[in-house]
Amino acid sequence: MEKNTNYYDQIYKEGGHKKMYAKHYRYSPYLQLWEKSLDILKKIKEPRIIDIGCGVGQYANLLFDHDFFDYKGIDFSDEAIRLAKMVNSRYGDKFKVDNAYTSSIYNDNYNTAILFEVLEHLQEDLRVLGKIKKGTEVLLSVPNYDAVGHVRHFSGEEDVEKRYGEVMTIKAIDTFPLTKTSKLFLAHGVKG
């Protein structure tokens, strides 16, 4: 079952597992995946990015450090957006508290959508992906492990392909280890 904003506000206030949300992106367990996503973004002509579930803005901070400034991030957690604006003080106007199900961000001018570590938290993940404009480059990441806030997880790349191949043409799926047993899958595709 999906958790509410209060649940995530508290996690962000506490810094998350091993205080990972309080660290610079260079020390994030997601760094390897994020660096791979940068390689993909560099191949997209003039990426205009929307980031659904942007969290505390660590990934956005990485993007800004690599000169990707055409960016908008939303998260439904007030605390996440407060921290994102603090971490990215020069770009605070690029972050907004909003709901992935009802946001008007899908009507904006973008050609790239980022959904990192968010879809496993959403009961209606396919509905959210369905709102993204046709032809948009999509980068999403999902885990192979269950956690309190997850409504689903994936046993392997085939599971990711099976679920999200319905709404996008998947170009590649890469696997990134977090621990001996925990992994993240990075899928890159084009919204159909």
Image (spheres, grey):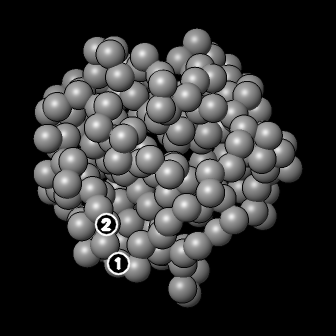
User: Residue 160 bears which disc, if any?
Assistant: 2
Q: Is residue 130 left or right of residue 61?
A: left
Q: Is residue 180 above or below residue 189?
A: below
Judge the density around disc 1: few (<14), some (14-19), many (≥20) Cα neighbours within 10 Å. some
The amino acid type, in three-letter code, at marker 2 is Val
Answer whether labels 1 and 2 touch (C-beta < 8 Å): yes
Residue 156 in percent (x, y) is at: 35, 78
User: Residue 156 bears which disc, if any?
Assistant: 1
Q: Is residue 22 above or below residue 67?
A: below
Q: Is residue 81 above or below residue 144?
A: above
Q: Which residue is depicted at the point 50% across and 51% down? A: 123
The residue lying furthest to the bottom in this view is 180
Residue 139 in percent (x, y) is at: 32, 47
Q: In terms of secondary structure, where does tag 1 sit?
A: loop
Q: Which residue is depicted at the point 42% across and 48% down? A: 125
- Which quarter of the rendering shows the N terminus? bottom right
Image quadrant in which you'd find residue 54 = top right
Q: Which residue is depicted at the point 72% across and 38% down? A: 5
Q: In terms of secondary structure, where does tag 2 sit?
A: helix
The answer to whether any part of residue 67 appears in the image is no
